[in-house]
Image (cartoon, rainbow, N blue to C red):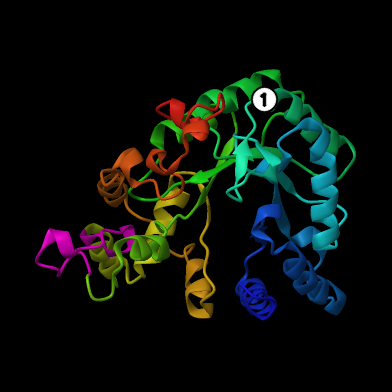
Amino acid sequence: AGTDDIDKTIDTALEAGFRHIDTAYGYKNEEAIGKSLKRWFDSGKIKREELFIVTKLPSTGNRAEDVEKYLKQSLENLQMTYVDLYLIHKPIGYFPELDKHGKHVPDPSTDHLSIWKAMEAQVDAGRARSIGMSNFNARQVKRVWENARIKPANNQVELNLFFQQKELVAFCKALDVTICAYSPLGSPGMRIKKNKGDPSKQVATISPLPSQRIEMPLTDPVVLKLAEKYKKTPSQILIRHSIQRGVVVIPKSNNPERLKQNIQVFDFTLSPEDVYELDFLDRGEKCRSYEPRETMSKSELEHPENPRKDPY
């Protein structure tokens, strides 16, 4: 998104009541977010301590000696002295240099334990209030957790109605590691692109041919039925379902109306029967949108820290 779009999105989000802002060095929008938030701080409408700001260490910085450098750069971009949560963005580390095809090559020497010690040093220095990881599997979380002086606070992963990650959620909860769901609506934009279609014309309930459907959580018949029952939007049903599972959700939207709707989920509760019905719509790994196994390179698949080597 451009700077103007980010300004508009931040304004709409803060006015609607959002206080958790998720970014990353790799998203290349920290500077624009920093400028938008500074405008709010300078106006006195909001204080820094009222917000929960999350950013992430890029995978090209997945080595102990790079952690401080990248966090300091992120803080400079955001015009802040600390973040509330700093995450290791991906378990696989990459070399910063590009190869002859213009791509970053995986660094097989990625060492989560040495990176974690450098992450802990950022908490000691006051640059991060808490630390965690993103896209890590259970084994990777456990190894860090067992060796950590400062325990991981959070694991941010892809999670939605069709890809509920039940085993990983239960495992992390047992260790007091919260789960934050990115793409909690099932990445509708990505699915449409992938299927070269338009879900408004191919809603799951009305398309006669299965081959013409774009199957998405937002258009699932059970979700549409519950949206009708609770007089809520399909997005609100999906967000509420994750919240009732004890999962933090960060739905992404640049649409002002949808942004406002996404936070209006605290005035109703799904019944246990309805939660149960939604729980049964999980389809597992085949509904992963981001970096499924088939899109990974040979060197990523063979990397010692490839998170897909384990079932969860």
Q: Residue type at mark 1: give it.
A: Ser
Question: With 65 as the anchor, is 281 left or right in this view?
Answer: left
Position of the N terminus by quadrant: bottom right
Q: Nearer the viewer, residue 153 or 295?
A: 295
Q: Residue at x 82, y 71 (%)?
A: 38
Location of residue 256 by image quarter: bottom right
Q: Position of residue 28 (x, y in %)?
A: 69, 61
On whether residue 287 falls in the magenta region, the answer is no
Which residues are the magenta region?
A: 203-221
Q: Nearer the viewer, residue 297 or 46?
A: 297
Q: Residue at x 45, y 26 (%)?
A: 309
Q: Measured along the vertical axis of the image, is residue 228 above or below residue 143? A: below
Location of residue 154 by image quarter: top right
Question: Can the viewer see residue 66?
Answer: yes
The residue tagged with tag 1: helix, strand or loop?
loop
Q: Nearer the viewer, residue 165 or 59?
A: 59
Q: Position of residue 153 (x, y in %)?
A: 66, 37
Secondary structure of the magenta portion, mostly? loop
Q: Total marks drawn? A: 1
State the residue position of label 1.
109
Q: Residue at x 52, y 32 (%)?
A: 299
Q: Residues within 10 Å of mark 1 (few under 14, many from 20)?
A: some
Q: Residue at x 87, y 76 (%)?
A: 42
Position of the C terminus by quadrant: top left
Question: Can the viewer see residue 120?
Answer: no
Q: Position of residue 205 (x, y in %)?
A: 17, 66
Q: Measured along the vertical axis of the image, is residue 216 above or below residue 44? A: above
- Residue with the most extreme front position: 100
